[in-house]
Image (spheres, helix red, strand yellow):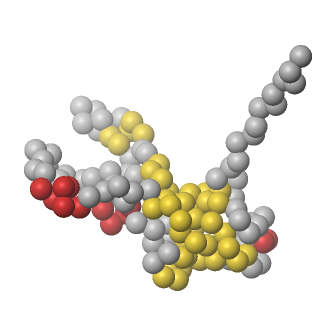
Amino acid sequence: MIEGKVAAIVDGSSVVINVGKQHGVRPGMRFKAVYRTVQIVDPDNPGNVLDGLTLVIGEIEATSVLDRFTFCLVDNPIITKGLNIAQFMEKKSIVDTDERQLAPEREVKIRVGTLVQEIEKQASIPRKAPA
């Protein structure tokens, strides 16, 4: 699996990643942009780290591949899909958002330094020929 990071933001729908032909990237390859949360610690036993999460922010597609970097189109903003900000703002919460958050709002956007991972194609299962 090819892994890299966003090296530059071109505009609102395209980015440059720091992997290219030398790393095996080809035009049309798809990557997921991910955010790794902080470690989740057991509040009853602070020495017990439970785990962290990897959240998919969106998907990008390699369009122009050079030796050491690749231009990509951002084509699937997963986080904002179907989000109605007006409805979201009207709702009140009893959750204390001043507490340390797993995924602060700033982190769920693609920006320089965001980790990208190749989306591996699923192997198709051979079907039996009809008898």
- Report if residue 24 is visible in the image: yes
Q: How many circles with numbers are drawn on the protein?
A: 0
- Report if residue 17 is visible in the image: no
Residue 9 x, y percent position in the rendering: 50, 79
Residue beneath the point at 64% across and 77% down: 71
Q: On screen, 123 above or below 89?
A: above
Q: Nearer the viewer, residue 107 or 31?
A: 31
Residue beneath the point at 77% across and 32% down: 125
Instruction: Specify the farthest residue to the front.
Output: 131
Q: On screen, 8 above or below 94?
A: below
Q: Is residue 10 left or right of residue 27?
A: left
Residue 41 x, y percent position in the rendering: 32, 40
Residue beneath the point at 38% across and 38% down: 49
Q: In this view, does 100 lie to the left or right of 110?
A: left
**Quadrant of residue 28 within the rendered picture:** bottom right
**Quadrant of residue 73 within the rendered picture:** bottom right
Instruction: Specify the farthest residue to the bottom.
Output: 10
Residue beneath the point at 10% across and 50% down: 92
Residue 36 x, y percent position in the rendering: 45, 53
Q: On screen, 126 above or below 92?
A: above
Q: In this view, does 86 lie to the left or right of 39?
A: left
Q: Which of 97 and 81 is in front in this view?
A: 81
Quadrant of the image containing the C terminus: top right
Residue 21 x, y percent position in the rendering: 78, 72
Q: Is residue 35 left or right of residue 122?
A: left
